[in-house]
Amino acid sequence: MTATATSAPLLNGQLIGITYHAIAAVRDRLLAASNLTFHQSVALKAVADGLDSAGAVDRLTSTLKTGESEAHTLLDELADAGLIDGARTSLTDKGDSLQRGFTDAVTELTERLYGDLPAAEREIAARALAHVTARANAELAAQ
């Protein structure tokens, strides 16, 4: 049996990587207007979600696969930029405005990229990616 142009692609690391880079390129265009790096945007979101400094550091180290020192540096950069109140780890008005704008832009992008896909297909893809992520995290923890 030969593959046809309508055959479903094989879910593998290459496809996931290609998809990641395509989405990241679009995301980085959205971030360019804010002068934030992706890692800084993740840190800003952690603070926006109400996490204190320790909670934000935990999220950053687990999601970005970075060390605590780099996580603290990200929070310091946001404080230096006037986006968070470093002492309380809360958003400033400027940080809140930036976070809301970025969240709105990502919501619109998500709708354009995924909006017309059937919910069942999105659920299957989400479950598969969650399993792959858990396995990759287990590999990292075992080393």
Image (cartoon, helix red, strand yellow):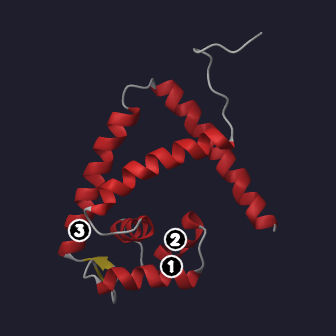
Taking 50 as reference, is 122 above or below it? above
Please name the amino acid that badge 1 sits on.
Ala
Q: Nearer the viewer, residue 138 or 65?
A: 65
Write down the quadrant of residue 37 in the picture: bottom left
Residue 93, x across and y down, in percent: 18, 74
Per the image, the residue denoted by label 2 is 60
Horizontal relation, residue 20 to residue 46: left or right = right
Identify the residue at the far bottom of this view. 87
Residue 57, x across and y down, in percent: 51, 77
The residue drawn where x is 36% and y is 31% is 115
The residue drawn where x is 33% and y is 36% is 111
SS under mark 2? helix
CA separation, marks 3 and 2? 19 Å
Disc with the residue nearer the chain's start (1 vs 3): 1
Taking 48 as reference, is 19 above or below it? above
CA separation, marks 1 and 3? 20 Å
Per the image, the residue denoted by label 1 is 71
Per the image, the residue denoted by label 3 is 96
Taking 106 as reference, is 86 above or below it? below
Where is the C terminus found, in terms of image quarters?
Answer: bottom right
Where is the N terminus found, in terms of image quarters?
Answer: top right
- Circle 1 crowding by C-alpha within 10 Å: few under 14, some 14–19, many from 20: many
Q: Nearer the viewer, residue 100 or 19?
A: 19
